[in-house]
C-alpha cells in the first residue's frame, strides 16, 4: 500500500522559572501563550548590564501549540498527509546559574497510533541552542547558535478507515538543562477516510475519556474544548451537544455556566473546532463540581463525551446555606396550561430569606419561547425578542411585591399555542432568581425556579371553572 508522508513540526525550547516535571495533558490551567506571558512578567531588568536575566536556571520544554486562550489541553494535531507547523521560541536561565545555551534529546512513543503505520519514528538531539527572548540584544546570545529547532515527524497517509482520531506522544527525554512543563505532549492524527465523524479529544491509550480541570478564577475567556472532524471536511457542518452535571458533586449548568449553548459549527475544510464553555466565578464556598459535555449529533463517535471539573476558589466565600430560598409557584414544571386559563399570563414567586437580617429585596425573571425550528425568543418586558436559546435575558421591571415574600408579574400578551401542526412553538421555559439585601442570589433548581411548561388549546365553557379548566399534568 502506498503511503504519503506529511510533516509535523514541534517546538523544543529553553525556559526559566518553570518547575521541572512532566505535564499531564488532560490538566491544564493555562495554555502556552499564558505561560509565556507569566514567565516574561517575572523577568527583571538590570541597570548595570545590557542583558536582562530571568530568575532561576533555564530548562527545556515544548511549545508550538496554536489553540485559543483558555484551551482545555496542550497537544499537536494534524490530518493524515498534512504538514502542521508549530511556533518555536526559547527562554534562558539567570545570569548566575546559566542556561542561555542548551541542547535536548527527544523521541516519539506509540499510543493508539503506531510507528510505521501512522507515523515515522522520530528521535534525536537538538543542536546547541541559544535564547531569542531579547532579539534586540545580540551580545546576550551567540549569533552562531540557532535560536530554535524544528523537529519534523512524518505522518503517514493510508486509504484505510480507522478511528476518527489516533494519538501518539512526542516527548523530551533529557538535555543539558532540566525539563520544564510541558515536556511531553500528545500528537493527534485525524483520519481522512470513510464517512464524516465527530469526536472529542481522545486519550493516548484510547480508553476512557478526557477530564479537564479549571479553577473559577482561571476561567477568563472560558474553557475551550477541542472537537475533531474526521472523514470528508469540504462542507460546513453543525454539531449539537448537551451540558449536564455529573459526578459526586454535579455542577448546575444553569447556575455554574454562562450560556452553555448547544451547537458548534465547522467551516468548510475545518477539522478542529473549539467548543466554548464560560464558567461562572461566583462567591459561594462550594465543593469542586463536575459536568459532562455530550455530543448529540448523529455522526458522533467515541469519545462522545468529556468531563470538566470546576475547582472552587472561594475558601473564604459566602456560605451557600444562607442563600435565600423559595419557589417559582406559577407556572409549574412540565404542566400544560390551556390558552384561556385565567392565570396563564401571571408569574408568582414565593421567597424566604434564610438570614432574617437580610430580607429578599429584588426578583428577576427570564421567559424563553423555543420554536420548533430550533430558534428561541426571550421576553423583554413588552414582547419576545429572538436570541440564542442559552442566552437568558433577565428582566425585573414591573415585578410587584405585595407581601414581604411574594412577587407577582403579569405578561402583556397571550402566549401562543405550543401544540398542533399549525403551532410554531415547541415549549416555554420560565427562570426566576431573587436576591436578599446582602446581594446573595437564590440557587437555580429544576422544578423550583426553572420550569418548563406548554400552552394547549383553550378550555370549553367558563375558564374560571376550576374543575373543568385546569392545567394538565404530563
Image: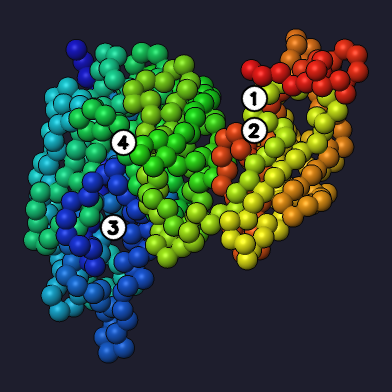
In the orientation shown, which residue stands out farthest toward the bottom? 48
Which residue corresponds to mark 1?
334
Instruction: Specify few, some or many for label 2: CA neighbours under 10 Å numbering under 14, 14-19, or 20 or more.
Output: many
Q: CA distance from mark 3 to mark 2?
A: 53 Å
Which residue corresponds to mark 3?
89
Instruction: Specify few, some or many for label 4: CA neighbours under 10 Å numbering under 14, 14-19, or 20 or more.
Output: many
Q: Nearer the viewer, mark 3 or mark 2?
A: 2
Answer whether residue 189 is visible to the viewer in this image: no
Q: CA distance from mark 2 to mark 4?
A: 32 Å
Q: CA distance from mark 3 to mark 4?
A: 28 Å
- Secondary structure type for disc 3: loop
Disc 3 or 4, which lies upstream in sequence? 3
The answer to whether residue 413 is left or right of residue 12 is: right
Residue 258 figure quarter: top right
Q: CA distance from mark 2 to mark 1?
A: 7 Å
Q: Position of residue 352 (x, y in %)?
A: 64, 51
Answer whether residue 461 is visible to the viewer in this image: yes
Residue under the point 29% across and 20% down: 163
Residue under the point 13% across and 75% down: 97
Q: CA distance from mark 3 to mark 1?
A: 57 Å
Q: Is residue 438 above or below residue 363?
A: below
Which residue corresponds to mark 4?
210
Q: Nearer the viewer, mark 3 or mark 1?
A: 1
Which residue corresponds to mark 2?
451
In the orientation shown, which residue stands out farthest toward the top? 421
Q: Are marks 3 and 4 in contact (CB under 8 Å)?
A: no
Q: Position of residue 206 (x, y in %)?
A: 23, 27
Disc number placed over residue 344 in the picture, else none: none
Q: CA distance from mark 1 to mark 4?
A: 34 Å
Residue under the point 49% across and 28% down: 241
Amino acid at each position: 500500500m502506498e503511503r504519503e508522508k506529511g510533516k509535523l513540526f514541534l517546538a523544543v525550547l529553553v525556559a526559566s522559572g518553570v518547575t521541572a516535571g512532566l505535564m499531564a495533558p488532560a490538566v491544564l490551567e493555562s495554555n502556552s501563550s499564558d505561560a509565556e506571558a507569566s514567565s516574561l512578567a517575572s523577568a527583571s531588568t538590570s541597570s548595570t548590564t545590557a542583558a536582562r536575566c530571568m530568575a532561576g536556571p533555564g530548562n527545556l520544554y515544548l511549545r508550538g501549540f496554536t489553540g485559543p486562550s483558555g484551551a482545555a489541553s496542550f497537544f499537536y494535531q494534524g490530518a493524515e498527509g498534512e504538514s502542521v507547523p508549530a511556533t518555536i521560541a526559547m527562554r534562558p536561565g539567570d545570569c548566575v546559574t546559566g542556561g542561555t545555551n542548551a541542547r535536548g534529546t527527544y523521541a516519539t512513543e506509540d499510543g493508539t497510533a503506531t510507528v510505521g503505520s501512522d507515523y515515522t519514528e522520530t528521535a534525536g538531539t537538538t543542536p546547541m541552542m541559544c535564547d531569542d527572548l531579547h532579539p534586540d540584544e545580540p551580545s546576550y546570545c551567540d549569533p552562531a547558535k540557532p535560536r530554535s529547532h524544528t523537529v519534523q515527524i512524518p505522518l503517514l497517509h493510508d486509504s484505510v478507515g480507522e478511528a476518527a482520531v489516533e494519538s501518539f506522544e512526542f516527548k523530551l527525554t533529557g538535555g543539558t538543562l532540566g525539563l520544564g512543563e510541558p515536556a511531553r505532549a500528545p500528537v493527534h492524527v485525524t483520519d481522512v477516510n470513510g464517512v464524516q465523524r465527530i469526536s472529542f479529544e481522545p486519550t493516548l491509550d484510547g480508553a476512557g475519556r478526557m477530564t479537564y480541570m479549571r479553577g473559577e478564577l482561571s476561567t477568563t475567556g472560558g474553557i475551550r474544548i477541542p472537537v475533531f472532524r474526521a472523514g470528508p471536511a469540504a462542507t460546513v457542518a453543525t454539531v449539537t451537544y448537551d451540558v449536564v452535571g455529573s459526578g459526586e458533586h454535579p455542577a448546575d449548568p444553569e447556575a455554574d455556566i454562562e450560556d452553555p449553548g448547544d451547537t458548534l459549527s465547522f467551516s468548510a475544510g475545518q477539522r478542529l473546532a473549539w467548543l466554548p464553555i464560560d464558567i461562572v466565578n461566583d462567591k459561594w464556598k462550594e465543593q469542586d463540581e463536575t459536568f459532562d459535555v455530550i455530543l448529540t449529533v448523529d455522526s458522533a463517535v467515541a469519545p462522545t463525551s468529556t468531563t470538566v471539573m470546576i475547582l472552587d476558589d472561594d475558601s473564604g466565600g459566602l456560605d451557600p446555606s444562607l442563600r435565600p430560598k423559595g419557589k417559582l409557584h406559577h407556572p409549574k414544571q412540565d404542566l400544560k396550561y390551556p390558552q384561556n386559563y385565567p392565570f396563564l399570563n401571571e408569574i408568582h414567586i414565593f421567597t424566604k430569606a434564610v438570614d432574617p437580617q437580610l430580607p429578599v429585596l429584588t426578583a428577576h425573571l427570564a421567559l424563553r419561547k423555543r420554536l420548533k425550528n430550533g430558534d428561541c425568543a426571550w421576553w423583554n418586558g413588552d414582547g419576545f425578542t429572538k436570541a440564542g436559546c442559552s442566552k437568558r435575558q433577565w428582566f425585573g421591571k414591573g415585578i410587584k411585591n405585595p407581601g414581604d415574600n411574594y412577587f407577582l408579574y403579569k405578561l402583556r400578551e397571550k402566549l401562543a399555542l405550543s401544540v398542533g401542526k399549525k403551532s410554531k412553538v415547541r415549549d416555554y421555559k420560565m427562570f426566576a432568581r431573587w436576591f436578599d439585601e446582602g446581594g446573595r442570589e437564590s440557587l437555580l433548581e429544576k422544578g423550583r425556579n426553572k420550569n418548563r411548561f406548554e400552552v394547549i388549546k383553550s378550555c370549553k365553557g367558563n375558564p374560571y371553572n376550576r374543575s373543568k379548566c385546569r392545567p394538565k399534568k404530563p
